[in-house]
Amino acid sequence: MKKFVRGTAIVGVLTLAVAACGSKPTDSGTSGGSDNKAFKACMVSDSGGFDDKSFNQTSYKGLQDAVKAKGLTEVKAESKSDNDYPTNMTAMVAAKCNVIVAVGFKLEDATDKAANANAGIKFAIVDSAPAKPIANVKPLSFNTAQASFQAGYLAAAMSKSGKVGTFGGLKIPPVTIFMDGFAEGVAYYNKQKSKNVTLLGWDEAKQEGLFTGDFEDKAKGQNNAQNLITQGADIIFPVAGPSGLGGLQAAKASNGKVNAIWVDTDGCESAAEYCSVLISSVKKGMDVAVQDAVTSVVDNKFDNKQFIGTLENGGTGLAPFHEFDSKVPAELKTELDQIKTDIIGGKITITSKAQPQAS
């Protein structure tokens, strides 16, 4: 497992056996602004792993930032499959964690059960909210449909073939919310410009489209992207974690004919080897949200009110254009800024049913 802890000293390894996760939970101390080494800040990844260049990696950065800023001890468990979630969550409880952050919708059941059984531990979960609020669970949600709307408009405007494509990992709300927003952005471009850019890979009305079936298999992602490219798409929007990297591989192999827009984090930072084909990325401020959640426990300011990241509060947004900055027309940049203003102001209404609702 790739280690991402920077500036830390290993002070021990917990001897808790984690049957299926492929690695023992590791316990690392670090020097920070305060002496809080007795405080254990913990995280369980989903099956994509901490080095997925996307969802888990960004969330893990938030844990690292909190650990460094507050001088905490970090404990983490990397899941190798969905079967690992209950085991890894149990290991974190046994490690006497003060706060446990669960990364992803798929950890919802394991988190709810652990939280209900351990009232003395605080929990946070990314991309999920309990059906009924739980006193010791902080939901961290993101309305990525908003920035994905901008991405859809951007893709439609930049397409030369008049066809753009998207595919997902699993058909779950944290994935389809991106695809919905992207679809609505393409439709908005067509309406504003009297164009007919076609979206391949997702039908928002029917909620049907192209999926890899997991978040791990890059070959599936590459095959899905190639399928879209064969149909004429020249801009790809993968929403599939590590599987989506296969889509970036397909775009890069096109030798300039196909480009992409990444999700969750700025792809030019997390997957720099593909920056040459990335027009932009839909950022999701999981690092900041996770850091804030952990810090709130340290500072005795924890609450279970759901956080929803939006364009307005910076919880989601478009990343810089990087190598495409000179290729994106000034007029289009202005239009994207106006779209952001109109979404925040309510002039543009996004209809995706996957958008998080305040609990």
Image: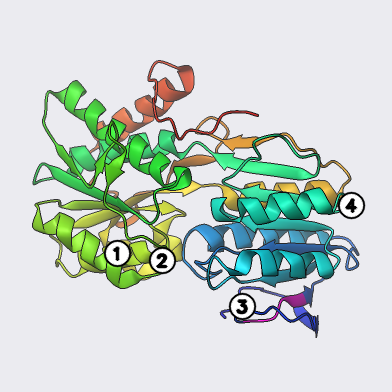
Give how far apart the Cα atoms at labels 2 and 3 are. 20 Å
Residue under label 2, please give it: 242
Residue lying at 41% horizontally and 28% vertically, measured from the top left: 340
Q: Residue at x 74, y 81 (%)?
A: 17
302 to 339, vertically: above or below: below
318 is within the stretch colored magenta: no
Magenta region, residue range: 23-27
Disc 2 and disc 3 in contact, CB within 8 angstroms: no
Q: CA distance from mark 4 to mark 1?
A: 41 Å
State which tag comes first along the sequence, 3 or 1. Answer: 3
Q: Which residue is mark 3?
A: 20
Q: Residue at x 87, y 63 (%)?
A: 39
Mark 1, Cα crowd under 10 Å, few <14 / some 14-19 / many 20+, is many
The kind of secondary structure element at disc 1 is helix
Inspect this view and state whether residue 279 appears. Answer: yes
Q: Nearer the viewer, residue 262 or 176?
A: 176
* Tag shown at residue 221: 1
> What is the residue that sits farthest to the top in this orientation?
347
Q: Which mark is residue 260?
A: none
Looking at the image, which is closer to me, 315 or 18? 18
The Cα–Cα distance between marks 4 and 2, rounded to whole angstroms, is 35 Å
Image-quadrant location for residue 65:
bottom right
Quadrant where the C terminus sits is top right
Q: Are marks 4 and 2 in contact (CB under 8 Å)?
A: no
